[in-house]
Amino acid sequence: MSQVEFRLLGPVDILNGEQSLGLATPQQRGILASLLLDANRVVPIEKMLRVIWGEEPTESARNAVQGYISKIRRILAPFPDCGIATSPQGYSLQVDRGRIDLYRFRHLVDVAHRSDAAHSAEHLKRALELWQGPALTGVAGQWLPSRVGTYLEEERLSALEDHAAAVLEVGRLREAIAELTTLVVDHPLRERAAGLLMAALHRAGRRADALTVFRNTRHHLVRELGIEPGTVLHRTHQQILSDAL
């Protein structure tokens, strides 16, 4: 039997190898996501109610949560090394965190931050490959996507920037430019991504394109946020103008 694994970085699911074990409803996925995000810690039932029903749970909400927990327990029953424990305060999923993609992602990012550029790029590539779409896809309610999903997406974007920086540092200019161009187009307010793209373009002999990135980024920042680019981006701009980068 393959080892059971859990996905948060994409459609929330329980997997046996590549086979989904069949979470049937958004409510079940929301409850599972709550347990996985705090794996091995008690998740208060009040938090689970908020995840599914917001600030106004229905009268039958507590019974419904018990039903969702029972369903997840049945799915996990063939796997004796993980399961859901009950306490007076709520429930906890007892599991090796290495089976949860989010924790594997964070571990690889941490290893990358302690590695040289070449190895950092490799670890970050593996970390980013764990993402199968937007985090927490398919859960009921807006609480998890708005409160937690936003932070997880920031972790992904930061890892993308870290990977591009590592690739740039080892001189893989074409790869860095391709990654950063996509990132800047999709997220035009991210100054670090813009600065890295400017540096990559300049090193590739595309000084005019690098300066265009600065102008476009400044335009977006002023128009959408009412602010000028920060010190780091201005410094990169000046270094390109003086060919000092």
Image (cartoon, rainbow, N blue to C red):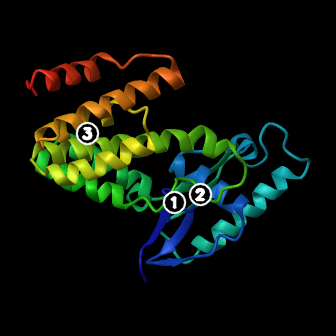
Q: Nearer the viewer, residue 64 or 23?
A: 23
Q: Nearer the viewer, residue 185 or 67?
A: 185
Residue 223 placement (x, y as % from top left): 51, 23
Cβ atoms at labels 2 and 1 below 8 Å apart: yes
**Nearest-to-viewer mark from 3 and 1:** 3
Q: Is residue 139 above or below residue 241?
A: below
Q: Image check: 166 left or right of 151?
A: left
**What is the spatial separation of the Cα atoms under label 3 and label 1, in whole angstroms?**
27 Å
Badge 3 amino acid: Leu
Corner quadrant of residue 99 = bottom left
Give the number of the disc on residue 10.
Answer: 1
**What is the spatial separation of the Cα atoms under label 2 and label 3, in whole angstroms?**
30 Å
Question: Who's the residue at 44% across and 45% down the image?
Answer: 186
Badge 1 amino acid: Gly
Q: Residue furthest front?
A: 208
Q: Earlier in the sequence, mark 3 or mark 1?
A: 1
Badge 2 amino acid: Thr
Q: Where does label 3 land, which residue?
A: 197
Question: Who's the residue at 61% across and 73% down the image?
Answer: 75
